[in-house]
Amino acid sequence: MTRSVLAFALFTLSAAPFASADTYDIDKSHSKATFRLQHFGVSWFWGQFHDLSGTVSFDEKNVGASTLSLTIAADSLFTADKKRDEHLKAPDFFNTKQFPTITFTSTKVTGKGKALQITGDLTLHGVKKSITADAEFVAAGKDPFGGFRAGWEAKIVIKRSDFGMNFMVGGIGDEVTLYISLEGVKK
């Protein structure tokens, strides 16, 4: 065996563990972002975003090599009340005409087993801030159509005022809990 062949074989073997991340396209029909905040301090108000897209690169054995890129169409907001949805999409809140997307790009993923922490840049209402989400790798497996899928859930707590959404802070809660459920199809 020549030196160059041996060097190539050693390089290939040493690089193999770093190439084990699988990439998944987010399945829009099986992924949602749900949020809740207090309404006048007496109850929880819930809403959803239905249009999520992006990719997850996930390495279960080396979670630090994993990444997430998520885009939420702000106009896909739904609260089951047309008039309220129109107000939430207006400049008092999300201002979806000026800020049509909410994005999250991971910068660091840590954890063990199924428990993960995902740190990254959240851009909401034109403001970008670093946040950390508690997340869970749910499971992965074959689907009945010959594909391979994986799922994750995350919980993020933010203050909407940190993102310039100050309308009625006090009457409508400032602290927002966002639950994200993602299902991805392996590329």
Image (spheres, rainbow, N blue to C red):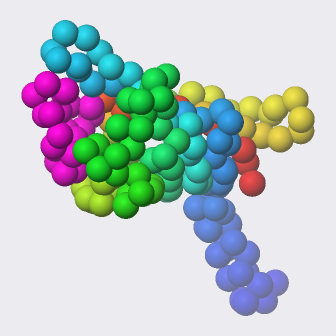
Position of 140 relative to 14 (above/below): above
Q: Nearer the viewer, residue 140 or 78?
A: 78
- Residue 52 shown left or right of residue 106 in the figure: right
- Residue 182 shown left or right of residue 140 in the figure: left
Q: Nearer the viewer, residue 113 or 10?
A: 113
Q: Residue 187, located in which quarter of the rendered image? A: bottom right
Position of 106 relative to 31 (above/below): below
Extent of the magenta region:
157-176
Q: Residue 3, located in which quarter of the rendered image? A: bottom right
Residue 184 appears in the figure:
no
Residue 168 included in the magenta stretch of the image:
yes
- The number of callouts visible is 0
Could you say where residue 107 lies in the image, as x and y percent from the top left? 37, 58
Q: Going 34% across and 46% down the picture, which residue do you hit?
A: 90
Q: Residue 148, located in which quarter of the rendered image? A: top right
Could you say where residue 33 lies in the image, as x and y percent from the top left? 48, 34
Could you say where residue 41 lies in the image, as x and y percent from the top left? 16, 15
| Direction right: furthest residue | 145
Residue 173 included in the magenta stretch of the image:
yes
| Direction left: furthest residue | 170
- Residue 166 shown left or right of residue 5 in the figure: left
Q: Going 74% across and 32% down the picture, which residue do you hit?
A: 141
Q: Quadrant of the N terminus?
A: bottom right
Q: Nearer the viewer, residue 124 or 3?
A: 124
- Residue 184 shown left or right of residue 84 in the figure: right
Q: Going 46% across and 24% down the picture, which residue do you hit?
A: 81
Residue 10 appears in the figure:
yes
Q: Going 61% across and 67% down the picture, which residue do you hit?
A: 14
| Direction top: furthest residue | 42
Could you say where residue 5 lies in the image, as x and y percent from the top left? 77, 84
